[in-house]
């Protein structure tokens, strides 16, 4: 019972299907799991297994059809976009495979963006963002645009951006998918350090050595967790 | 989270945010703003130009009183009461008294006579100098109908009329031609066709252009003196009348005409026996012409503005599509649909306003430039002077443009919030 209370994420029988034309595609078929506070979990599965959909649901970027999702003790069922935006900004940080930095904004501005949406004043926002850039070792690159940086640097900026609003959970979608092996291991080291500070980390990946660096791995097969 | 509602409309952060977006594609921003800018430019320039034309025409009229009318006798064109057609008739002083007593729509009757005239021979001399000027016999009230500015001395008065004084009020140009500089004209004398008059006043006209030149070369002498000196006796050259402002010019003209026709035994339907000209109908014509000008410039300027606004909407729609990913990222970073909507709306309105203001500025600058050019050419551009737009006109145009900006922003903003974050950040 104690682990249940400590669970920062609890999924109970989540179902999700997409309708394309006349066909109904069931992507998640009643998926349940718990992720504890401070855990670093890898989600693995072949393409089409529903891992990206799961991550989108966890990140409140997509809705689910049935079941219940408790995030930090609150139900995420039937959220409207406004409420979802509020929870995203308060509780969640995102790291994407393709970095998803805004091209016309400098590294510092990109990192400060979540704070902008929390209406934190410019000066304060830039000071905080600079702190996080320091944390990922990119303080000298603050005024550079994303296309002036390498893939690894871009991902570190994205990680700083995910951290800046002090989320409880970081969701990473193939964070090393676009990086070479050396950079990949740097990024993973960074993510581990962040996790060590107590932030729950969920990483979707298809690479076994990446998954091996996590506390545990959830295998998805056809929209369900493979317990074998 | 409570803080969000506190963001005011003119948040510096949001302005910077908007500028940053615009500067990522400055050329396109410029092009899309061009339409609206052009629309407002057109409105300002065309309204300014028609105002300039109006100012020019009005100043040529020189503040001549709007309710004035001129009336003269011609030749009858219809037989009546035993008279054959083709009869010449003249007005005389008893007709003047008759009009003063009977015409209810007339405020002031000024009978006039004229000597000399356009390109006449030299008729006025002073010592060795001479010139050809218009000499008018007038009553003091005439200055109310066709105002002049008294530079020194005085205008005609009732005493001059009653006592048939041989005095003259001369135009500025007359002074220049007949007098050496530094000679005091008041109290000096001039000869008009051999008759000596003493100068009591100098005036200049309020008009501009050709009319002004003619006016400044004129001499006013008392009406009664004129009759005595130049043997017109009882005859009236023509009437200048000041009409009641509350009666329409056409109505009062008809009243005066029918009274005079009856008195002079002219057929009531004879339209050619008397000539008349009224300032009011002239003004009405001019005014309605300019009202039409203004309306046309507003309609076409407005259409240009509309086209501009549609252009902006179009560009914003394209921009929103292109920025799907960016907007998705913003959503993932905590932007609410309202925030995104506000951003797109602000961008549209900002762009519309900015380009509109540029259009207005360029328009006003162009008008000022033309103004400057006209002034450097001697202050008189013929029938064109002081092209200008009122602040009121500009504010209306800006208001219309702002409304269009809001309308242009709605569709793109709705499109933008329809973007779901998950679609936006999906890896291609």
Image: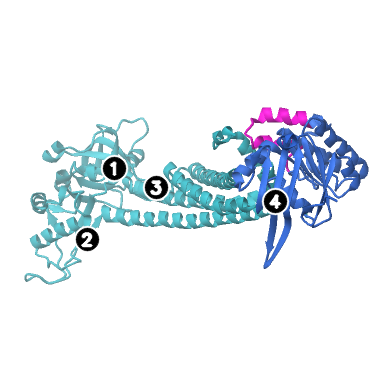
Chain colours: A blue, B cyan
Residue at image mark 4 = A14
Q: Which residues are magenta?
A: A104-132
Location of the N terminus of chain B (image quadrant)? top right
The residue at the point 61 percent across, 38 percent down is B15
Residue B212 in the magenta stretch? The answer is no
Secondary structure beneath disc 2? strand
Instruction: Tell me whether marks 2 and 3 sit on the same chain.
Output: yes
- Residue A5 image point, x, y percent: 71, 35
Q: Along the line of sight, which residue is nearer the eye, B362 or B242? A: B362
Secondary structure beneath disc 4? strand
Which of labels 4 and 2 is toward the front? 4
Which of labels 4 and 3 is toward the front? 4
Q: Chain of mark 4?
A: A
- Disc marking residue B55: 3
Q: Chain of mark 3?
A: B
Whether residue B249 is visible here, answered yes or no, is yes
Residue at image mark 2 = B275
């Amino acid at each position: 019972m104690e682990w249940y209370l400590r669970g920062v994420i609890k999924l109970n029988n989540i179902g999700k299907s997409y309708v394309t034309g006349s066909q109904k595609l069931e992507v998640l078929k009643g998926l349940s799991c718990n992720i504890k506070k401070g855990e670093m979990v890898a989600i693995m599965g072949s393409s089409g297994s529903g891992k990206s959909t799961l991550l989108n649901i966890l990140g409140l970027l997509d809705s689910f059809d049935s079941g219940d999702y408790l995030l930090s003790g609150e139900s995420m069922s039937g959220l409207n976009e406004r409420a979802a935006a509020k929870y995203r900004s308060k509780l969640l940080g995102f790291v994407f495979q393709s970095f998803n930095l805004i091209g016309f904004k400098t590294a510092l501005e990109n990192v400060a963006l979540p704070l902008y949406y929390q209406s934190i004043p410019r000066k304060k926002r830039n000071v905080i963002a600079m702190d996080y850039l320091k944390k990922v070792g990119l303080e000298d690159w603050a005024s550079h645009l994303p296309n002036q940086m390498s893939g690894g640097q871009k991902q570190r900026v994205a990680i700083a951006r995910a951290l800046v609003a002090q989320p409880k959970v970081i969701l990473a979608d193939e964070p090393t998918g676009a990086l070479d092996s050396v950079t990949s291991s740097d990024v993973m080291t960074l993510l581990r350090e962040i996790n060590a500070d107590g932030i729950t980390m969920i990483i979707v990946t298809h690479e076994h050595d990446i998954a091996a660096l996590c506390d545990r791995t959830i295998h998805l097969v056809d929209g369900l967790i493979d317990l074998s | 989270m409570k803080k969000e509602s506190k963001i005011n409309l003119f948040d510096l952060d949001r302005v910077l945010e908007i500028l940053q977006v615009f500067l990522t594609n400055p050329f396109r921003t410029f092009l899309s703003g061009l339409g609206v800018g052009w629309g407002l430019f057109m409105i300002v320039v065309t309204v300014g130009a028609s105002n300039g034309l109006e100012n020019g025409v009005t100043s040529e009229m020189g503040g001549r009183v709007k309710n004035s009318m001129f009336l003269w006798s011609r030749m009858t064109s219809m037989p009546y009461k035993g008279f054959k057609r083709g009869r010449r008739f003249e007005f005389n002083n008893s007709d003047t008294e008759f009009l003063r007593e009977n015409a209810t729509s007339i405020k002031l009757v000024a009978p006039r006579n004229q000597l000399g005239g356009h390109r006449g021979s030299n008729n006025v001399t002073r010592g060795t100098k001479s010139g050809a000027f218009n000499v008018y016999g007038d009553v003091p009230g005439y200055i109310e109908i066709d105002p002049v500015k008294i530079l020194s001395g005085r205008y005609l008065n009732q005493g001059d009329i009653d006592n048939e004084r041989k005095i003259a009020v001369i135009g500025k140009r007359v002074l220049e031609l007949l007098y050496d500089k530094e000679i005091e004209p008041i109290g000096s004398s001039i000869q008009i066709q051999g008759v000596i008059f003493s100068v009591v006043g100098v005036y200049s006209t309020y008009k501009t252009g050709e009319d002004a030149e003619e006016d400044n070369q004129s001499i006013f002498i008392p009406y009664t003196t004129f009759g005595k000196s130049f043997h017109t006796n009882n005859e009236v050259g023509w009437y200048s009348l000041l009409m009641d402002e509350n009666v329409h010019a056409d109505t009062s003209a008809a009243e005066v005409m029918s009274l005079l026709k009856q008195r002079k035994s002219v057929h009531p339907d004879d339209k050619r026996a008397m000539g008349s000209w009224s300032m009011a109908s002239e003004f009405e014509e001019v005014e309605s012409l300019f009202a039409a000008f203004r309306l046309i410039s507003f309609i076409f300027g407005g259409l240009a503005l509309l086209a501009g606004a549609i252009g902006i909407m179009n560009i914003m729609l394209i921009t929103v599509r292109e920025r799907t990913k960016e907007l998705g990222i913003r959503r993932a970073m905590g932007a609410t649909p309202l925030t995104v909507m506000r951003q797109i709306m602000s961008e549209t309105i900002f762009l519309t306003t900015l380009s509109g203001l540029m259009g207005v500025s360029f328009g006003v600058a162009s008008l000022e430039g033309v103004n400057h050019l006209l002034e450097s050419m001697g202050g008189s551009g013929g029938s064109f002077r002081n092209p200008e737009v009122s602040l009121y006109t500009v504010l209306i145009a800006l208001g219309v443009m702002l409304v269009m900006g809001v309308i242009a922003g709605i569709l793109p903003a709705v499109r933008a919030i329809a973007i779901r974050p998950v679609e936006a950040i999906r890896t291609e």
